[in-house]
Image (cartoon, helix red, strand yellow):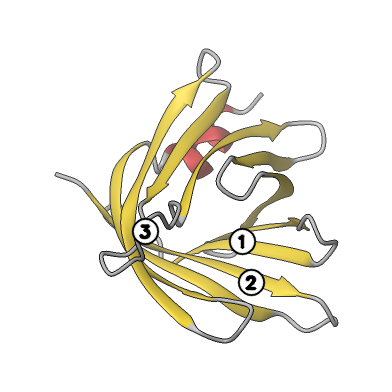
């Protein structure tokens, strides 16, 4: 395996803070913040991350976390693409996506639990910042749903 391929996601190893926004199904928009931690796993053959996003400060008492989950990512050297599995107990779901570098971005595609198509992308990547976007397509057209603007800690 070309170990340099691992650095596509290896570049994110560390701790990140973010501010984001989410468009809910009813059209309302929610602003939020949280943290995202990336680290090597499985003797350096994979990357695991943990995303922690508590409810917004103005949440209703008893409202659950906005998001809390983990991803395992590994590079499939035969297929020449990244495979990821996102596990989110908050949404009681597991999602699988795959993809890789597209120009200066990272683009992953898969399906949501309801069968709609998902596209997650890492954009405007620098050593200390990047923008993560989540899009959904139910009728063939991609629609932005979520965006997080990340800053490396330290």
- Separation of residues labelled 2 and 3 (CA atoms): 21 Å
Give the residue displayed 72% in from the left and 63% down from the top.
118
Q: Which mark is residue 73?
A: none
Question: Where's the C terminus, which quadrant?
Answer: top left
Q: Nearer the viewer, residue 45 or 93?
A: 93
- Separation of residues labelled 1 and 3 (CA atoms): 22 Å
Q: Secondary structure at mark 2?
A: strand
Residue matched to label 1: 120
Is residue 150 in sight in this rendering? Answer: no
Question: Where's the N terminus, which quadrant?
Answer: top right
First-in-chain label (1 vs 2): 1
Give the residue displayed 58% in from the left and 75% down from the top.
145
Is residue 86 in sight in this rendering? Answer: yes
Q: Secondary structure at mark 3?
A: loop
Crowd rating for badge 2 (residues with CA inside 10 Å; few <14, some 14–19, many 20+): some
- Separation of residues labelled 1 and 2 (CA atoms): 6 Å
* Contact between labelled residues 3 and 1, with CB atoms less than 8 Å apart: no
Asked which quadrant contains residue 45, the reply is top right
Give the residue displayed 55% in from the left and 16% down from the top.
42
Farthest residue toward the top? 43
Q: x, y (%) of residue 130?
A: 38, 61
Q: Nearer the viewer, residue 133 or 3?
A: 133
* Contact between labelled residues 2 and 1, with CB atoms less than 8 Å apart: yes
Counting labels gives: 3
Q: Secondary structure at mark 1?
A: strand
First-in-chain label (2 vs 3): 3
Residue matched to label 2: 135
**Which numbered mark, 1 or 3, is in the foreground of this view?**
3
Q: Which mark is residue 55?
A: 3
């Amino acid at each position: 395996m070309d170990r340099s391929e691992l650095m596509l996601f290896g570049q994110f190893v560390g701790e990140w803070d973010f501010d984001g926004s989410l468009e809910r199904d009813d059209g309302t928009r929610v602003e939020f913040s949280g943290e995202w931690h990336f680290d090597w796993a499985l003797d350096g053959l994979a990357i695991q991350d943990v995303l922690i996003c508590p409810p917004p400060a103005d949440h209703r008492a008893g409202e659950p976390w906005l998001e809390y989950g983990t991803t395992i990512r590994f590079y499939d050297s035969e297929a020449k693409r990244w495979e990821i599995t996102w596990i989110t107990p908050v949404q009681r779901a597991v999602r699988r996506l795959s993809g890789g570098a597209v120009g200066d971005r990272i683009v992953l595609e898969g399906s949501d639990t309801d069968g709609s198509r998902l596209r997650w992308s890492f954009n405007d990547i620098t050593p200390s910042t990047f923008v993560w976007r989540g899009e959904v397509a139910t009728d063939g057209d991609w629609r932005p749903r979520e965006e997080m603007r990340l800053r490396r800690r330290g």
